[in-house]
Image (tube, rainbow, N blue to C red):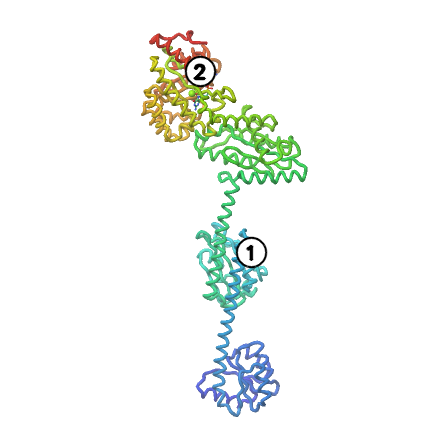
Amino acid sequence: MLEDVPSDAELELRTIRQAGIEFESRRAESRNEFLGLLAEFKPHVVLSDFSLPGFDGLSALKLVREKYPDLPFIFVSGTIGEERAIEALKHGATDYVLKGNLARLPSSVLRALREAEEYRQRRRQEEKLARLSRIHAVLSGINSAIVRIHDRRELFQEACSVAVEQGEFRMAWVGLAVPGAATLKPVAWYGHNDGYLDEVAAAMDGAAENRGISGQALRQRNVIVVNDIENDERVVFRKEALARGYRSLAALPLLVDDEVVAIFMIFSGETGVFDQEEMKLLSELAGDVSFALGYLAKEEKLNYLAYYDVLTGLTNRNLLQDHLKQAIAHANRLGRMVAVVVIDLDHFKLINDSLGHSAGDQLLKEVATRLLSCIRDGDTVARPGGDEFVMVLPDQVSEESVSPVIQRLLESVSRAIYIENQELNITCSVGVALYPQDGGNVEMLLSNADAAMYRAKDLGRSNFQFFAKEMNAKVSERLLLQANLRHAIERDELFLHYQPKIDLRSGRLIGAEALVRWRSRKMGLMSPGRFIPIAEESGLIVPVGEWVIRQVCAQNRAWQEQGLPPVCISVNLSAHQFRRKGLPQLIATALREARLDPGYLEMELTESMVMHNVEQAIMILGDLKAMGLELSIDDFGTGYSSLSYLKRLPVGRLKIDRSFVQDIASDPDDAAITQAVISLGHSLGLKVTAEGVETEEQLAFLKANACDEAQGFYFGKPMPAADFALLLDSLGSTRGRALDHHSWPA
Ligand code: C2E
Ligand code: MG
Ligand code: MG
């Protein structure tokens, strides 16, 4: 009440009270008193005289309208002319009541209060609508960002700036969940921040767990709303927040696959903005951002799979080509060279087959790590597949600048590797091609480096070769060979040689090993050493192997039908063949069709074929054994034999590898190994055959050590079927007589 006459004031108040309105009142007479009451007493309605000694009603009205636009202001005055009344209403007075007609005052006060309340509500409604439409703008802003942006940080940054710019929030930030640490790391922010995040981050860093609202949202995986920061105990950084004008806040967890990956924090400069409807929209927003994050995570993973080798984490074939292309472009600009280095592990297949895939994988990982340690920044190590690695070394000045890197990698790979408590010594063969002289594009460089690598292998492995033009001939030979081998069977180009096997005690011919040969119309006669590895690589070993089995069965049956003495013929199986389903059926069919007794057929397997998967091998061998076949382990001593398994294998024979037999007369080590294999074989109830017997000394040693059987040039080279038939025939006519080795053809 602004009134200088106390009795007037008393009269007005009584009038209102008599109308049944309960209230409290304060009276001011001066401008200062009036301002003080407005701030402290916070009235719901102002009653003001028009003219006072030191102040005037119109000025008071202006003051009120400036600061409290909805506060009802009623003039109560003795006289008021029409002109003044109009002016008062123009300045926003709610009503005027003449002191001579005070009876009107109570209803005027009541109406003013009601209208003020209605006005406040309407304004709240309007504000809310405006706010919601701002949030809608935020939502659509973020959704368009989601479509546009393919980077997580950028998406967070955009979410923050959209919230502040379009949502008219005071500040927004995103904290990334630190895995396993229950804390957040701010990664994006926008708006009025003024060091707030630094202070908060510093406080969070020290604490074992972040107790702020963002931390709570992270742990509870829930939206948290604080609509009045000033009066909410939960806000740990209240002082810091209020200092920046933050009055309310919302913490929105962003989830991917049910895990909180980040918290989106939004601050408003007003209290009470986060009501139900607003939160519905904000939750939708959080859901959209979460969706985008999940999508990005999948995309990242897909990208990763598309460009990286999952086992080693190295660049894969796709990315390798990219890098090489870039390196070439770079070299063109600077007039430099690029080295492409192909690295192939020697005998990796053997390790993989004998120790199993998991050991093989570990080995590849270890080699990847070692190769990475050999290179500089900007170089690439890729694993395009299998046991092959490729390095791209840009910025080379000469052939000489490449050599040290290659020396380093050869040395690094050849250091002992320990896997599953075994020491492995692996070497590699390396081929190098240089841009521009060895090839002008990615394909040429890779294929020429490959050719150089094959050359290194041919030269005895564990070395490196720079590409030379002649090498292409080698590679094309491999390809040519493979192409021709495809037609070898239908063109009837394969045939078999038979190498005699002798019983050492009696000296009798006891059978033969069938060895495949290929006379290619285009490429001439070829030994299995040349085409069997290529047949295995290309899978052609399957039809070739099947042909051999059928041919051996048919041939052996034919000899028996000719009346020759029945003998056992052995066939070499390859790893590929052995592991393929249906091998026993295939053999059974071949035997049935040839009407051959299974006891006259023997299968030769190598240790590595068996050790690859011992349980499976035991089963397959069991099946073959049950069919009545003879089984032997070929090339014994060259693989990674596990003697404990050997006991469980249903085989009847060990064939000592030629490499031991070769030097038994001169090398004590080989002699010792051969002796050991013979006695080991005997202790397991196996027969022992020596391969590659060429001299009388070797034969003497083997006989002296009770070796059971032998095979080798001393007794006979692998020979055509007709020649072996002659041999059998001569044996047939002297059946039972021990053969003197002098009677063997030279
Ligand atoms: P292998 O099974 O160890 O066969 C013995 C190899 O040693 C044969 O070579 C034979 O000619 C050679 N050899 C025999 N006695 C002597 C000797 O006194 N001195 C020397 N220096 N060598 C001797 P070949 O015929 O070139 O066969 C090589 C390898 O090819 C075989 O080794 C076998 O692993 C594989 N192979 C041969 N035929 C087949 C087949 O039909 N299928 C499969 N999967 N592999 C085959
Ligand atoms: Mg063999
Ligand atoms: Mg052998």
Say if 269 sits above or below 143 in the image: below
Amino acid bearing label 2: Pro
Helix or strand or loop: what does disc 2 sit on? loop
Describe residue 392's horizontal placement relative to residue 274 as left or right. Answer: right
Describe residue 629's horizontal placement relative to residue 51 as left or right. Answer: left
Percent of width and height locating residue 259: 45, 52
| Dot placed on the residue nearer the N-terminal end, 2 or 1 | 1
Say if 715 sits above or below 173 in the image: above
Q: Residue at x 66, y 34 (%)?
A: 397
Mark number for residue 654? none
Q: Which residue is mark 2?
A: 718
Q: Is mark 2 within 8 Å of ligand 1?
A: yes
Percent of width and height locating residue 420: 44, 33
Between 165 and 455, the one nearer to me in the picture: 455
Q: Which residue is mark 1?
A: 157
For the residues labelled 2 and 1, the Cα–Cα distance comes to 77 Å
Crowding at dot 1, Cα within 10 Å, few <14 / some 14-19 / many 20+, comes out as some
Task: Locate the N terminus and report the quarter of the image it occupies.
Answer: bottom right
Write down which quadrant ligand 1 falls in: top left
Give the quadrant of residue 603.
top left
